Image (cartoon, grey):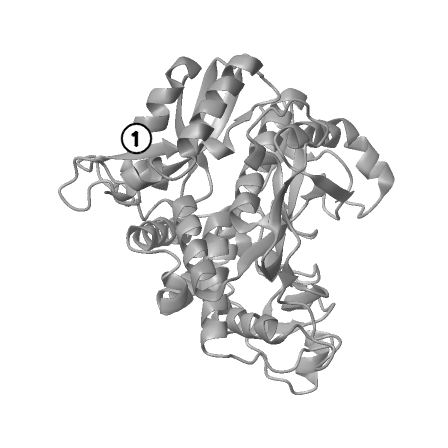
Amino acid sequence: MTDLEAHVAREGRDEMVRQVRQMIDELGITYIYYQFVSVTGRIVGKGAPADHWEQFAERGFQLVYGSTANLFTDRAGNYIGYGPEASELVGIPDPETFAQLPWDKRVARVFCTCFRNREERDNPGAHLTSDCRGNLRIIHQEFQDKHGLQLRNGAEPEMMWLKRDDDGKPNGGVTKPNCYHIDQFEELRPIFMQVIEYAQAMGLDMIQGDHEDAPGQLELNWMFDDALRTADRLTTYRQICAQVAREHGVIACFMSKPFVGVSASGCHYNISLWRGGEDRINDLHQSPLPGMEDVFSYVKGGENLFMPDPALDERKPGPIGLNCVAGVMEHIQALTAIGSSTVNSYRRLWDTGFWAPVFADWGYQNRTCGLRISAPGRFEYRSVDSMVNPYLLATGLLKAFDDGIGRDLDPGEPEERNIYQAMEAGKEVTRLPMTLGEALDALAADEVIKSAMPNEMYQVFEHYKRDEWARYNATVTEWDVETYLDCLP
């Protein structure tokens, strides 16, 4: 049995396919987006009338392999990852992710897992290793089988709502850059209330939000959960924001650093490892549910292995937690290539004074470090911004955790001083990579983190991002012209 066949035949799937058909009929859904996620986190896929649900559920759909790299060409005109001679992948819908789109209730979406074509000579029907979402499911399951622990995390996606000029181009933020001001939050109320309404209808348990300190910058958070569900919800959140932007005539900007002199948009990850627990449905006042139960489910309970052991230390994470902190510190240079994955990401690090992490250290409530213990039982990974592919980052963190636990790594003592003051006092601290090129070099040298991108996944990521770095270096900017146009004689 191939991976594809095993996925279609997995226990309970036939019943979920029938439940989706019942939901299609009851909700009046006539069209379905079959979607997966590319190397950059973009949503790609196909659409089809809901009449064909059962056929797609069994056989899937076909799409060129290069869609996992946005069907993008490099500077030389070569397709990244896969050429036009390559076969087509098979996308198999995961019925548990089926949900109605609240802005057009005739339409639903379902996430898909990607496989090699059934007619391939080599490994027909195998998992497509350039499917970042499929890789997270596999690697997380391997981690759970090995350690008996589940990764749960929350994401804090900052982003900016920008005005459009008469030509449709960005024209500054909708609001002033006043952090935590309710007045500025209120000015964006029509936008964020629409986002929250759509988000709850698609299973996101929204818990808090605020106006951050850049023009039009908001952070809206939802409840933490299993790593794959959180990644799916972050992807869904971005899809929702794009729709709300269309409705309000503004731009939903996830670019990390559109403005100099104000904060960039980070996407901090709050992380913990758990043993046990169970799924509980949170209907979010939706009755009947406009999606499968899994969309509205969250893992609750169990034992949090990051909680401090009072017999050892009332503040430090427990032994497993310390191993994981050490694993992240060991591999933070390579992880930066995933968490800060664009050329623009590093503008966030160079524009000093805005709390972006620049140094590879850890502490408690210390925002000058790349990793901090944000509360008992969890730590916040800060070297990540709003352009992150959440599936790639979660797999990278799992590999860092596995290495930290397997080698019983010790992170040393937490830094409680401002890191800059500690350095003035003589502490030697390693800086994070300060360019995309430097981060890609660190990733290339780190076999542990590279293993989070098995086979074709790393090849596609490396090709895509090296080309992005090369394109940037080959671009003449306004800064070049202003600096060098008349500097001689």
Give the x, y percent position of residue 330.
Answer: 49, 74
Q: Quadrant of the N terminus?
A: top left
The one nearer the camera, 124 or 102, is: 124
Q: Secondary structure at mark 1?
A: strand
| Position in image of residue 458 (x %, y %) | 34, 55
Q: Is residue 324 visible?
A: yes
> In the orientation shown, which residue stands out farthest toward the bottom?
426
Residue 112 horizontal/vertical position (percent): 41, 35
Q: Looking at this view, name the residue that lies furthest to the left.
A: 121
> Which residue is depicted at the point 51% across and 79% down?
409
Residue 484, can we see it?
no
Q: How many marks?
A: 1
Camera-nearest residue between 13 and 261: 13
Under mark 1, the amino acid is Leu
In terms of depth relative to the viewer, which is nearer, 265 or 219? 219
Residue that label 1 marks? 63
* Image position of 153 with respect to 296: above or below: below
- Describe residue 59's horizontal placement relative to residue 175 as left or right: left
Relative to 391, say whether 295 is above or below. above
Where is residue 28, by image quadrant?
Answer: top right
Q: Quadrant of residue 425?
A: bottom right
